[in-house]
Image (cartoon, grey):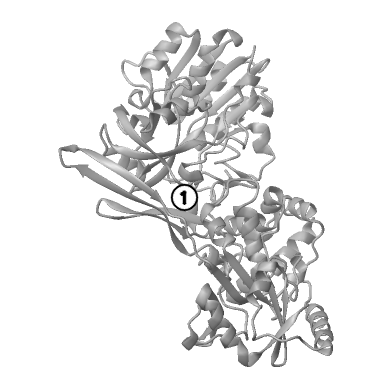
């Protein structure tokens, strides 16, 4: 049975969670909503979709993969020994109040980083100790299109709890037993029957408010079609304004390309994993000077083809959650919805 | 062919973690290429290390970084792994500063290999340019361990100048003792050069190997590969008779970091070896 909590008790709930877990919640900063480590004095907001996706909690922008140390042998200065230490994150985390499109992003990471190929031990360790509290999205923005890519603004598979706001009350549905443990508290009550009906109606109308900018067929058909338009001149036309800034990859809940680089301090140091972006020309630049994706249209084509074709072929999953951030933030006004819709009409 | 089940597990099951290794020998191959012998520090792991011709490894020089190199020693060589490194970027330049005894990291073997088990009873023509001979070297060693299984073996090998030819003593050895026909070429005439002169693709068309019952394997700079493939097809080779091994900028080597893809295939896990038939199915993004 769902439970409910009134708005004035949310802060108490968050404070309690933050005593047991590292808690991430959205904070309002200079008009922007940012997912941040929770600090009671900074408060929280549930008003807007956070500007950055939640991926950074489980796949940090920069993280240590290993530590190394070279040591000279004092008896034989010619000899240098090397020691290596792997780093595995262990941290119980709760990500609180994120929209279903960001939960879909985390589900996506799970497919790619712990699927049929090599597993990523850093993501896996973080994900296995993470609880997710989703917030149903009742007023999707004009850039939102989650229903067109198999998502829902108001349901959130992969989350542990789902909150739905009705006036000053939040109805809380436990999706997993782990999620239920988070609400076994005196702060929660039982929602009235009529509130549950209102929740159902609110969810229906949220779904209805979303328009589909394109219609995808089955995933394999989509993958095939996107491969067929690889040579389309539209890629070049549509990306003329792109300035290769990479913001679309930065704010995207599914973009996961990364770089590995060593940072030395004297004889010791760390190997870091940092977010990278396939939109940067240096991303594929080889030491010989050869670059297989030198032109920006080639890089953009790779990005969208990866999301709408290659990932389906390799991981049976679509690489887009319909959050619309790339449309909202693109300084050149590139709208991937229009590009996908245009390309799908070519085949 | 290696399957994806042959995964590099890494210390503690972390495939990003290298095993520690020592450079046991280091010598210049050409003016800008060195060859290294590398032995894993754990003797048991070294003895148990097995790889197939064409597979690669990631070498780490901590503080400088990690790069991908093909293992070019003989697969049956159990004392060390050989790599050849051309001075090109930051990591490769740092490797050129090392000396014997240096401690490095090694992740591997990674990637697929040449499908030599499909080459039985066939003529084999290997075509290489410069350091492109490195991936073909372990293949040649392997073929020569079971020489009788194969028909004619020919190597067309070119470089810019005589100084840029790698593995010179191997070439003589294969020619003298391996029943291998070797055709050497350089780009421009040099006094005292007693072999062919001309770009590798041109020499391929001159030598004109017959496609019947033959497989061709080529590796070299991208521009050489491109024109060798054209010449081979002109000679009547079918795409499934031609193999090449590709280079791409790589980081993780595990199919996760994203950069080495050609369409849905990752050079690091689905390659580096591809038949031309496989490449033709992929988007043209070489």
Residue at the location (58% across, 66% down)? A130
Residue B173, by quadrant, is top left
Horizontal and vertical percent position of residue A276: 49, 59
Q: In this view, does B165 lie above or below A185?
A: above
Residue A113 falls left or right of residue A171:
left
Nearer to us in this view, B278 or B47: B47
Residue B214, by quadrant, is top right
Quadrant of the image containing the C terminus of chain A? bottom right
Residue B125, by quadrant, is top right
Residue at the location (63% across, 75% down)? A182
Horizontal and vertical percent position of residue B33: 34, 32
Confirm whether residue A168 shows in the render: yes
Residue B231 falls left or right of residue B10:
right
- Dot 1 surroundings within 10 Å: few (below 14), some, or many (20 or more)? some
Residue wearing tag 1: A285
Residue A311 falls left or right of residue A15:
right
Query: Label 1 lies in what chain?
Result: A
Horizontal and vertical percent position of residue A216: 79, 62
Nearer to us in this view, B94 or A52: A52
Q: Is residue A247 above or below residue A271?
A: below
Confirm whether residue B33 shows in the render: no
Count of numbered labels shown in the rendering: 1
Quadrant of the image containing the N terminus of chain A? bottom right
Q: Is mark 1 on a helix, strand or loop?
A: loop
Residue at the location (36% across, 47% down)? A84
């Amino acid at each position: 049975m769902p439970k409910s909590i009134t708005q004035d008790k949310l802060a108490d709930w968050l404070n309690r969670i933050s005593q047991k877990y590292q808690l991430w919640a959205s904070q309002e900063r200079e008009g922007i909503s940012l997912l941040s480590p929770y600090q009671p004095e900074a408060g929280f907001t549930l008003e807007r979709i956070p500007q950055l996706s939640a991926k950074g909690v489980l796949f940090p922008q920069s993280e240590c993969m290993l530590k190394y140390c070279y040591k000279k042998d004092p008896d034989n200065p010619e000899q240098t020994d090397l020691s290596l230490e792997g780093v595995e994150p262990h941290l119980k985390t709760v990500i609180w109040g994120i929209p279903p499109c960001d939960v879909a992003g985390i589900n996506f990471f799970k497919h790619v980083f712990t699927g049929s190929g090599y597993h990523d031990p850093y993501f896996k360790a973080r994900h296995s100790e993470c609880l997710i509290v989703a917030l149903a999205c009742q007023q999707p923005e004009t850039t939102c299109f989650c229903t067109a890519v198999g998502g829902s603004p108001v349901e959130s598979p992969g989350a542990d709890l789902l909150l739905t706001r009705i006036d000053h009350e939040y109805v809380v549905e436990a999706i997993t037993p782990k999620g239920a443990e988070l609400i076994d508290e005196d702060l929660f009550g039982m929602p009235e029957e009529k509130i549950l009906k209102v929740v159902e109606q609110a969810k229906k109308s949220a779904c209805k408010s979303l328009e589909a900018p394109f219609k995808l067929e089955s995933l394999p058909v989509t993958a095939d079609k996107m491969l067929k338009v690889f040579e389309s001149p539209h890629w070049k036309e549509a990306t003329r304004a792109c300035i290769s800034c990479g913001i679309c990859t930065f704010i995207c809940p599914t973009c996961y390309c990364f770089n590995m680089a060593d940072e030395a301090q004297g004889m010791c140091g760390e190997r870091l994993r940092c977010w990278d972006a396939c939109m940067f020309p240096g991303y594929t630049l080889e030491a010989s000077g050869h670059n297989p994706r030198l032109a920006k249209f080639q890089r953009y084509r790779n990005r969208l083809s990866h999301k709408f074709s290659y990932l389906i072929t390799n991981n049976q999953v679509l690489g887009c959650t319909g959050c619309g951030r790339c449309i909202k933030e693109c300084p050149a006004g590139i709208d991937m919805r229009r590009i996908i819709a245009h390309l799908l009409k070519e085949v | 062919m290696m399957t994806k089940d042959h995964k590099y597990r890494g210390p503690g099951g972390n495939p990003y973690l290298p095993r520690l290794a020592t450079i046991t020998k280091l010598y210049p191959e050409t003016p800008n290429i060195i060859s290294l012998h590398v032995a894993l520090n754990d003797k048991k792991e070294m003895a148990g290390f097995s790889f197939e011709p064409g597979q690669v490894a990631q070498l780490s020089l901590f503080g400088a970084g990690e790069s991908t190199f093909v293992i070019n020693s003989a697969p049956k060589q159990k004392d060390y792994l050989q790599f050849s490194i051309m001075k090109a970027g930051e990591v490769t330049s740092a490797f050129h500063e090392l000396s014997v005894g240096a401690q490095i990291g090694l992740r591997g073997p990674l990637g697929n290999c040449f499908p030599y088990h499909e080459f039985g009873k066939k003529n084999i023509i290997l075509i290489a340019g410069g350091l492109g001979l490195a991936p073909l070297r372990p293949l040649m060693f392997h073929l020569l361990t079971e020489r009788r299984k194969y028909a004619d073996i020919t190597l067309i090998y070119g470089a810019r100048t005589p100084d840029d030819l790698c593995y010179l003593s191997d070439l003589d050895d294969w020619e003298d003792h391996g029943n291998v026909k070797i055709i050497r070429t350089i780009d421009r005439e040099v006094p005292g050069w007693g072999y062919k002169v001309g770009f590798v693709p041109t020499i391929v068309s001159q030598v004109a190997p017959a496609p019947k019952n033959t497989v061709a394997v080529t590796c070299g700079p991208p521009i050489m590969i491109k024109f060798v493939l054209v010449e081979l097809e002109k000679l009547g080779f079918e795409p499934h008779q031609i193999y090449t091994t590709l280079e791409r900028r790589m980081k993780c080597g595990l199919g996760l970091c994203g950069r080495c893809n050609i369409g849905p295939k990752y050079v690091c896990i689905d390659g580096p070896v591809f038949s031309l038939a496989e490449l033709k199915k992929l988007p043209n993004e070489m």
